[in-house]
Image: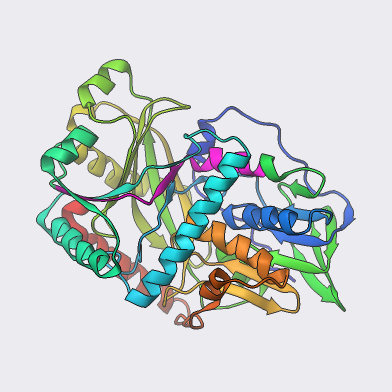
Amino acid sequence: MVKHQLPCDPGPSAWNCLLPAEPARAALSENRIADWLVIGAGFAGLSAARRLAQLHPTDQVVVLDATAVAEGPAGRNSGFMIDVPHDLSASDYAGDTEHDERDIRLNRAGIELALAAAHEYQMDDECIVLSGKINGAVSARGQSHNSAYAKHLDRLGEAYTRLNADDMKAITGTDCYIDGLYSPGTAMIQPAKYIRALACGIEGSAVTIYENSPVVDLVRKGAIWKASTPKGSVQAARVILCVNGHLANFGFHQRALMHVFTYASMTRALNSAEIKQLGGERRWAITPADALGTTVRRISGTGGDRIIIRNRATFDASLSVKEQRLTDVAKQHDRSYHARFRMLSDVPMDYRWGGRLCLTRNQVSIFGEIDRHLYSACCQNGLGTAKGTISGSLAAELASEQTSDLLQDQMTGNAPRKLPPEPVASIAANAVLRWGEFKAGQEL
């Protein structure tokens, strides 16, 4: 029996709110037989379904999602598809060199798959564009993190450009940033627009997506798996789980997954006078020099010119937080926003929301065959867009008995380290997060 715990994300999926409404897909209301079942319609799940359709064009692939496409974490992230090392447990993102080299190969393969899908399904550059990103520093501490990260990129042979305060102001319009480190390989996405376009692109004679169809039971009888939802069921010989942190609710890797919520706020659309007052470029993307600092994006397109602030993180073993949390973190969001955009201090926030990511203590994913013909592409360690894309696709290849160097890269790694029992895990994890945010100082 699957633990009956529906995904719970506070606030709206703001990226989705910016887009025109689209017709809802049907919930599963019948008993179906398929060749393949994919559970989860995020980056991993849709990428798995796409690859299955490529490898088995005459097979029937069913995708089940507990909510609507782009309403869950796939539509709630900051929209970075990052290629270079981005270890959230390190203050300057750098990890072990061998591990980082392997991650770069996988991240870039995920970005290439996303760009190929964008070309195939005729997505525009608001959906996805290879534009690079900047590690932005607002203090000497952040600048030192950038210098340490630059040395790590040198060891890896990766290209980057250092930016001074004048460069940063020319890009962002604000004089708060004193240093930047630009890396060219990141793709920026409007996550809800991209994931909606991907879902529409793969649907057809081979792939069917059912929304609002949470799996409440998953059992194997002989060689066949049966997934039950509140109103129907799917029987399939092979199943791919793309449910990220909810993997534990399916009975696997208990006390191994760290469920972290991050939070964001988005301004209302800037008017022409405010756009002129701010200056700078119309689109840019900044990750904080300190991993627990503030991510900032300026977007321009559907929904107008807006600024997005993301910071604060909480460990929530229950996989849910109350709406009150948004009120609590909003105060920090507003402080971070006003410190960076004093000239726009009268511009209010239009949306505030939270979203889930999943980590393991030793930064490994949960990938592979976890039961007979049951496969996992879960736990992306804070890089769900790029890593989810490649892990979902590679899970489809593994289930199809394919082999490749990339698949070997994905399967290389240790088992996830166990977490302490509750409530020790929550107390310890949140203490580490709060201490990290305190040390981030002005970078927050």
Q: Quadrant of residue 63?
A: bottom right
The answer to if 441 sits in the magenta stretch is no
Q: Quadrant of residue 254?
A: bottom right
Q: Position of residue 246 (x, y in %)?
A: 60, 65
Instruction: Identify whether 39 is placed above or below 210.
Output: below
Q: Is residue 201 left or right of residue 331?
A: right
Instruction: Identify whether 316 is placed above or below 420.
Output: above
Closest to the observer: 347 or 62? 62
Q: Position of residue 74 (x, y in %)?
A: 54, 49
Q: Position of residue 394 (x, y in %)?
A: 61, 65
Closest to the observer: 186 or 306? 186
The residue stretch that appears in magenta? 179-199
Quadrant holding the N terminus = bottom right
Instruction: Identify whether 382 is placed above or below 211.
Output: below
Q: Is residue 42 left or right of residue 294?
A: right
Q: Residue at x 20, y 66 (%)?
A: 151
